[in-house]
Image: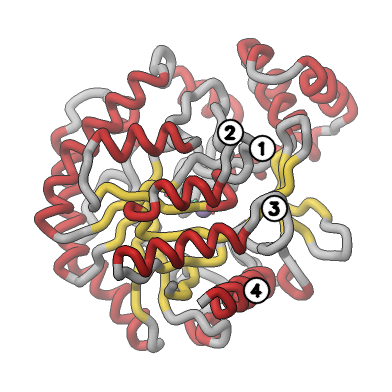
Amino acid sequence: MKETWRWFGPKDAITLPQIAQTGAEGIVTALHDIPYGEVWTAEAITERKDMIEAADFTWDVVESLPIHEAIKKGEGDLTPFFENYRQSMVNLAAAGLKTICYNFMPLLDWTRTDLAAPVPRGGTCLRFSAPKMAAFEIHMLGREAAHDDYDPAVIAAATTWYEQSDEAARATLLNAIMAGLPGAFDRYTIPELREVLKSYAGIGRNDLRQNYKRFLDEVMPTAQELGMNFCVHPDDPPRDILGLPRIVSNGEDIDWIMKAYDAPENGLTLCSGSLGANPANDVPEIARSFGDRIHFAHLRNVRKDPDGSFQEDAHLTGDTDMVAVIDELLEAESRDGKSIPFRPDHGHDLLMDAGLGTQAGYPLIGRLRGLAELRGVITALS
Ligand code: DNO
Ligand code: MN
């Protein structure tokens, strides 16, 4: 398995020479400044690649080559969006970039309600509180239908939270929910979010699946010609959010996707933290079932509460048996004769992390700790 590190580009508070000290050899990045739907030019790709290589790294994975919302919604004339997407693929492949991570989550990427929840012995982590999410949906957005999406006890706790919260707490909650959107785009205020949610009205699970299949049919033949591996990132959290359907949440969903375009290039990013947030998901089992289609891995752990809340735990503690997950990935590697790039996906804010101004979930010390722990497991198992 190849150790990689997510770098958000020149604007990242963490520099490439600092990343070099973590021991990681590969970089995972994207051209976050390019608006969704536009072409990644050969020049922009080469400029980023040169930067990475000048610091003695390889650029191993593109995360993400984002999919425009119009494609997810199946709305309007999609021809230019598909053409642009394929053009970006051609340009990436020409630069030797052949592993592409993306997601098919409508509107929001990863979603948390707390960016700095305390962990017992110091430091903070990302947390998803089901009551706070319900409070946001019901009381702040006014989405009445959310009553059906949560248990009555969660809804009662949501009301209590809302009644006790002040403006600042509600603004912090909105900010946390928006933080999962990478890059500088598409942060919404409450009225904007209400508006944009309307544009998804009537799009159910099957519609989203059909739109996804159309995307695969449009891009996978090009991926095959170019020798590129695509790897979809699972939904985080693996459940419907804001009434929007999510279709990459469990083994059954992944199976549908793999069969919707049945080719090795149509693969998976095994994100143990995302999948692990649903108690019904057996992550080592998912790694085993789809080992031949796993082209990239995000390794982290979560600890779940009975009410549907969860928080990010240290990489080797938490509910998921990470040694078993890594064992499956190593098996897949030796079976298929491949090397799977992985990154410590998120970390706790530890020690001086809080002052560094890094992206939420992507601290220096916390991920360094995670990477070191994972490296130990990999070394022992191999
Ligand atoms: C969260 C990440 C995701 C991931 C995208 C991939 O930290 O794992 O934001 O990059 O969903 O498209
Ligand atoms: Mn992930």
Amino acid identity at mark 3: Glu
**Among the two numbered marks 3 and 1 on one chain, the one whose residue lies closer to the N terminus:** 1
**Is disc 3 placed on a helix, strand or loop?**
strand
> What residue would you read off at disc 2?
189
**Is disc 1 placed on a helix, strand or loop?**
helix
Amino acid identity at mark 2: Thr
Residue 149 visible: yes
What residue sits 48% from the left and 59% below the top?
Answer: 328
CA gap between label 3 and label 2 equals 26 Å
> How crowded is the residue under tag 4: few (<14 C-alpha within 10 Å), some, or many (20+)?
some
Above or below residue 290? Residue 235 is above
Kindly report which numbered mark, 3 or 1, lies closer to the viewer in this rendering: 3
Above or below residue 53? Residue 151 is above
The quadrant the N terminus occupies is bottom left
CA gap between label 2 and label 1 equals 8 Å
CA gap between label 3 and label 1 equals 19 Å
> What residue would you read off at disc 4?
373
> What residue would you read off at disc 3?
312
> What residue would you read off at disc 1?
174
- What is the total number of numbered labels drawn onto the structure image? 4
Amino acid identity at mark 1: Leu
Q: Is residue 219 left or right of residue 56?
A: left
**Among the two numbered marks 3 and 2 on one chain, the one whose residue lies closer to the N terminus:** 2
Name the spot of residue 207 as percent of width and height, x first: 33, 19
